[in-house]
Image (tube, rainbow, N blue to C red):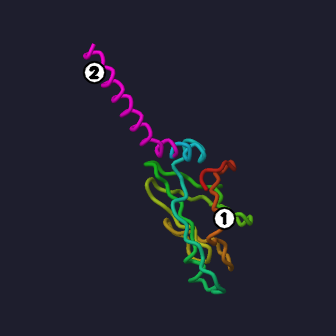
Amino acid sequence: MSASLTTRRFVAAFLAAGALVGAAALPASADDDRREHRGGQSSVVISDVQYGTAGRDRSARALNREWVEVKNTGRRSVNLRGFTLTDRQGNRYRFADFRLDGRSSVKVHTGQGRDTRHDVYQDRRHQIWDERDTATLRDNRGNVIDT
């Protein structure tokens, strides 16, 4: 009978350890939920946001310090043509024919400048992003990819 009791204790300890491992895996499943929210298969995400500072500095330099970074986490390049980046007030930036290489990113600056492979510009004359705002990235069909 003591062998049976030992076996039961071993099984109970094994199941308890499995429950702990399962609990530790919860953040991974939360990440899966976020991936699902982004549209399932998309490797394109909003990776960082630098919002403007409070004040009235509307210089080109100040506006270009305000940006949203869009990153391709996948290996294959993605054409962002028709993708949009919006805020709560309805300000919208629409990507033209822009190919984002795999494992690379592009910063969408608020101000004016010359577009490159790593920086594009909205050509706006006023601040858009602040600490209370929400950036939303949609694909060319209007599906939310990331917020």
- Does the segment drawn in magenta span residue 95? no
Count of marks placed on residues: 2
x and y, in percent, of residue 47 in the image: 51, 60
x and y, in percent, of residue 5 in the image: 30, 19
Q: Nearer the viewer, residue 97 or 119?
A: 119
Q: Earlier in the sequence, mark 1 or mark 2?
A: 2
Q: Nearer the viewer, mark 1 or mark 2?
A: 2
Q: Distance between the residues labelled 1 and 2?
A: 66 Å
The answer to whether mark 1 and mark 2 are in CB contact below 8 A is no
Q: Nearer the viewer, residue 47 or 73?
A: 47
Q: Residue 145 carries which label?
A: none
Q: In which quarter of the image is the C terminus?
A: bottom right
Amino acid type indicated by mark 1 = Tyr
Secondary structure of residue under mark 1: strand
Q: Which of 12 and 60 is in front in this view?
A: 12
* Residue bearing the label numbered 1: 93
Q: Which residue is drawn at 48% across and 51% down?
A: 77
Question: Which residue is farthest left?
Answer: 3
The overriding secondary structure of the stretch rendered in magenta is helix
Q: Give the side of residue 22 with respect to residue 36, left or right.
A: left
Amino acid type indicated by mark 2 = Thr
* Residue bearing the label numbered 2: 6
Q: Residues in magenta?
A: 1-30
Q: Give the side of residue 112 with respect to residue 100, left or right.
A: right
